[in-house]
Image (spheres, rainbow, N blue to C red):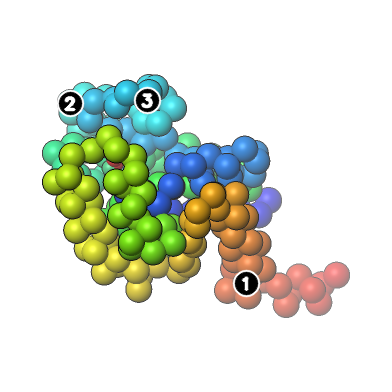
Amino acid sequence: MERGLLLIVSGPAGSGKSTVDGLLCQNPEFERSVSYTTRAPRKGEENGREYNFISEEEFLRLKDENALFEANYFCGHYYGSPRRRAEEVLASGRNFIMEIDVNGAMNMKKIYPEAVLIMLLPPSYSAQEKRLRGRGTEPEEKILARLARTKEELEFLPQYDYIVYNRENGAAEAAEEIRAIVRAEKSSVRRNPAAKDDYLAN
Ligand code: 5GP
């Protein structure tokens, strides 16, 4: 059985990560990791869907038990993804998506070098700014902080494998681009080291 791909998807605020990943996961070939976090649920979030919301004590216990693939402390809260589910999905040949920040992505690259790192971006910086303001839900200083954070996140772009733009009303197109990346990666010579021997033996 061919193993699935581990896809790491990062993207600044307003990139539409969860919309694009949600579209991908409509196909059973993809499953999104549900991380553990110690932050409180936001309005509309459900335990077990967006995150598994747990206490700091439980989080530290899972970390000690080596149940987490990686863990990060971000803006005052812990985040980490369950290791066992990732192993099960990849072993079954399905692709596993982890939506994590740039630090988590850099950790994962060390822990699991076969991972494919994808940076999802709005069409441009000015379009991102417009999207964040358009939501109309956040105070100005928070918007400015998110834009400043974007510049820091983009410093990590050279460590990523692919850039996908989420254009206006373009989530379906962005999801299709990610499917194309998966097809290309699966055909890569690097991922098929036994191809010559298999060919000659049949
Ligand atoms: P938020 O609290 O806004 O949902 O997430 C904050 C940041 O944590 C986002 O950049 C999100 O991608 C990242 N994040 C979510 N789950 C994990 C995880 O399991 N590990 C790491 N390293 N980051 C995560």
Three-letter code, disc 1: Ser
Write the residue at 29% across / 66% down: 154
Picture coordinates of residue 11, whole percent (x, y): 37, 54
Discs 1, 2 touching: Cβ within 8 Å: no
Of the 4 image quadrants, the one containing the C terminus is bottom right
Q: Looking at this view, is 30 or 177 the one in front?
A: 177
Which quarter is ligand 1 in? Answer: top left
Picture coordinates of residue 144, whole percent (x, y): 18, 52
Instruction: State whether residue 44 is above or below residue 6.
Output: above
**Residue with the mark numbered 3:** 45
**Residue with the mark numbered 1:** 188
Label 1 neighbourhood size at 10 Å, few (<14), some (14-19), many (20+)?
few
Q: In what element is the residue under mark 3?
A: loop
Labels 3, 2: front one: 3
Instruction: State whether residue 68 is above or below residue 50.
Output: below
State the count of labels: 3
Write the residue at 62% across / 72% down: 188
Instruction: State whether residue 188 is above or below residue 1.
Output: below
**Residue with the mark numbered 2:** 57
